[in-house]
Amino acid sequence: MFHDGSVVLFPERKTAPGSPGRETQKDAPVPKRPETKKSGDRLMDRMKKVDPNQSERYRQRTGE
Amino acid sequence: MKTVIGLETEYGALLSGVPQGMRDLFRQEEMFQKVRDHIFHVQKKGLIDQHQRAYDEPPGNGGFLRNGGRLYIDMGHVEYATPECHTLLDLVRADRGGDLLLQQAVEDMGLSDEISFIKNNIDHQTLATFGSHENYLVSRNFPFTERGMEPLVAFLVTRQIITGAGRVGVSYINDSLISLDTERPPVHFQISQRADYIVNKFYQWVQMNRSIVNTRDEPLSDPVQYRRMHLLLGDSNMSEFATAMKFGMTKIVMDLVEEGIAPPIGVREPVHACRAISHDMTMRWSLQDLEGRILSAVEMQEMFLEKASKAYAGRDEDTDWVLEEWEKLLTDLARKDPAVVSDRLDWAAKHEMISAFRESEKLEWNDPWLESLDLEYHNIDPSKGLFRILEDDGRHRRLLPPSVSETGTTCPPSFTRAEGRALAIEQILENPDMLYIIQWFGIQINQGDVLYMLEPLKSYRDEVSDYFRKYLSDPSKG
């Protein structure tokens, strides 16, 4: 529920999630096995574009 | 489930450009500050702290958000804490809302080519680890003793077969702290990101000597009635399904423990077992109980499921969903094929994806490219992240449509005090001259009376409305 285009007021309960089972049946896509060539290619194409050495650049501080 | 749950996530950051060694840590911190300031000062998605919150949280370090959650910089990481959530989908929505908040700020600032937020728990170079902390409200009657929590430890050690986020490689960094295997067999891929960094059964600290059950007693609510169980052994899940199952199963087991009806079982050498299960990609997952019996992690999980089904079936929709999916998962995991559960579990999805790539490109498991793919699985940028493709293509189970996830950036969950806090934040944003202190357990305006919110399962909407009505009608009363 939006007000002035940006301010969000509290959702009525109907807009908030219910239980996972009910929500999945309603709106969320049903999962599929990875069987379409198009999907496989899209994932493989993106994986090939990942910089092979980027894990070298990923250095973090220890957190909690 | 009559409960309150919440999740704290420390994000990693991947910077583009020529690596500058340790200077990148400073670049990173500067970038975090820019993103934080944009969220609070430009996008007005929350209120930055005006007061010194703690010795390491000066004014301006972070603040509470319109959704009732909190964003801040901690230990060199951007950390997001969800608001208090009452249902599993509220939790999933709030968790995804944190990802969206950060990504939207990055895009708004035109920084997408410079920084990516990575929602994982390790780096492969320095052996650093950072957290995903779960919070569960339990009663003060919870048997918070070593003996009382043996079943909880057994559950937590074995739940990783469902909740693990998977990782390429291994860390033996903590062998200097504890005596584990003398052998160090090669581990190409393992189930959990955090298992290698857990070295204690119980301990109160969070940055070192991490434990299976963190014993810090900081309820952030009425301490007479409540305890906040704070767990830091879990991984940052990308999967909505795994996130919901993690919180659902764990809360159910805490209920069993609190009511004294959990299976009377414990694990011998639980720290060792935690790591051994994570490293075992044969999916046999053997461990010893306290009587010396050899069981599998699946069998141990089945014991908890059986007790929970008897005690709680029909209790509410969330519980029934968890019990049903838990049973399906354990049946599928017993088939010892990650592909069978890759549509629901992060570690299996990542393993399938990286294994297929490795075979296609004829790479060895120690090729650094695979570590890079491991990271990219956790990239929250939908135009880069590998998990997002699995989800968008319907290959991994999604619980919420994107339009609902989007509301998680600004809408608080219902039926918890996050509603009242969010209402207070809206009021203050509309009255920018107000001085304020906001805490998890209360608010204070213009150094006036404190409105305490010690009951997490109450919305406090009426109390907050009255509090501001009183102030706005006579500001001197604060």
Image (tube, rainbow, N blue to C red):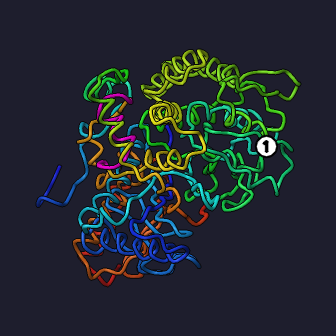
Disc 1 residue type?
Answer: Arg
Q: In this view, does B375 lie to the left or right of B155?
A: left
Residue in the image at 33% along x and 29% along y: A40
Q: Identify the residue position indicated by label 1 in the image.
A: B184
Quadrant of the image containing the C terminus of chain B: bottom left
Answer left or right for B88 relative to A18.
right
Q: Position of residue B346 (x, y in %)?
A: 49, 36
Q: Write down the chain letter for disc 1.
A: B
Residues in magenta, as a range: B382-396
Which residue is farthest front?
Answer: B362
Is B200 in front, or is B455?
Answer: B200
Out of B230 and B329, give the one closest to the viewer.
B329
Magenta span contains residue B395: yes
Residue B80 x/y as whole percent: 45, 59
Residue B66 is drawn in which quadrant?
A: bottom left
Residue that appears at 28% across and 75% down: B41
* Vertical comparison of B230 with B278: above or below: below
Identify the secondary structure beneath mark 1: loop
